[in-house]
Image (spheres, grey):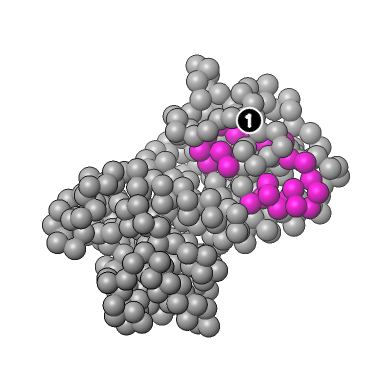
Amino acid sequence: MRIGLYGMPSAGKSYLLSQIDFIEVIAGSKLLWEMAPDFDKRDKAGRKKAREAVAKRLLAKQDFIMDGHYAFGDELAFTKEDGALYDIYIYLYIAPSVLQERMKASNKNQKYLRYDIEKWQKHEIASLRAYCHTYEKDFYVVDHPPVNTFKNVTEIVTFLKEIVKGYSCISYAKKCVDKILKQSKSNSIVLFDGDKTLTKEDSSRVLLGYHTSVFDGNFYTGYQMWRQYEEFKSYRILFSKEKSIEFHKEICKRITEDSYILTSGHPYIWQHLASELGIPFFGGREMSAETKYFITKFLQRAGKKIIAYGDGMVDYFMLKQAEQGYLVRKSDGFVSQSLKEQDMEGLIFV
């Protein structure tokens, strides 16, 4: 596998790569300057040509991780050759305030302070995510707080090891689709999120007392789901009359014989709840926003019409991709805060 590690100037990609010893590491900038010693003297077209040459050269290699840049301010660095090169994209997110401080301390990167750092980084993430959705590649944003202080990247390195071992949201999506197609009896399939869609509350919070900062960055990629799954391991589930889960009756009425639950909630809890509802569920550490999106896309490719229900950012891409995407509002009538910056056009509010 070929892994592209992306992020802003001063994000710390080089430091993260220095901690990796389980897959070949290639320093993209170093290789670029070796192949094009006059890079800084070239015009925009010349720099683009040099980047394309690096990507083409690496197409013959397998199993490596290399750092890259999507853009430098208003100059796009990402090329179609980059797109063809990588199987997996990792984006190293750093809080804009931290990036600004690092840039101020870097003679090389001070020039980028004239740009809106927050807007620039959001644009990179959204653009790479859209690219991976279109061309069906794994995409992960790593944003664990230690990245912002940069005292410890052990958890990120552990996650990268999992990727090398085979962790893949898109592969898991394909497995889910294979199972759904074997069970499906009609041309129309209904996909439901679990917590706060089929249930009124977050089942993990009710039954585990689970609270987390994993989603504070509003990223719901496979990295955040992997971290949540690791946190779940330290909680004990309490099923009792005092701690029962209330279903959202109006949404549950929409369950059909070809309905399936896609949940990032605790797998054991949802095994129990899905049994009560009488429909299959798919979940676990690889059930991310991307996984839900790709399950929808692959089922449509198999000729299925998709009706989808969800309440938040983890469901957003699934809802937008579905022929009918139903956004479940909160009890106060408002939608989840996680969706405040998203385009709601085409979604049906329930």
Q: Is residue 34 above or below residue 87?
A: below
Residue under circle 1?
346
x and y, in percent, of residue 32 in the image: 35, 76
In-image side of 106 versus 224 (left or right): left
- Quarter of the image where the C terminus is located: top right
x and y, in percent, of residue 23 in the image: 42, 78
In-image side of 67 versus 206 (left or right): left
x and y, in percent, of residue 179 in the image: 75, 55
What residue appears at the point 68 percent right and 46 percent down from the top-left corner?
296
Amino acid type at circle 1 is Gly
What residue appears at the point 42 percent right and 41 percent down from the top-left corner?
218
- Would residue 116 be seen by someone viewing this image from the given angle? yes
Span colored in magenta: 294-317
In the image shown, does 204 or 318 lie closer to the viewer? 318
x and y, in percent, of residue 263 in the image: 59, 43
In the image shown, does 253 or 16 lie closer to the viewer? 16
Q: Is residue 134 above or below residue 238?
A: below
In-image side of 220 versus 75 (left or right): right
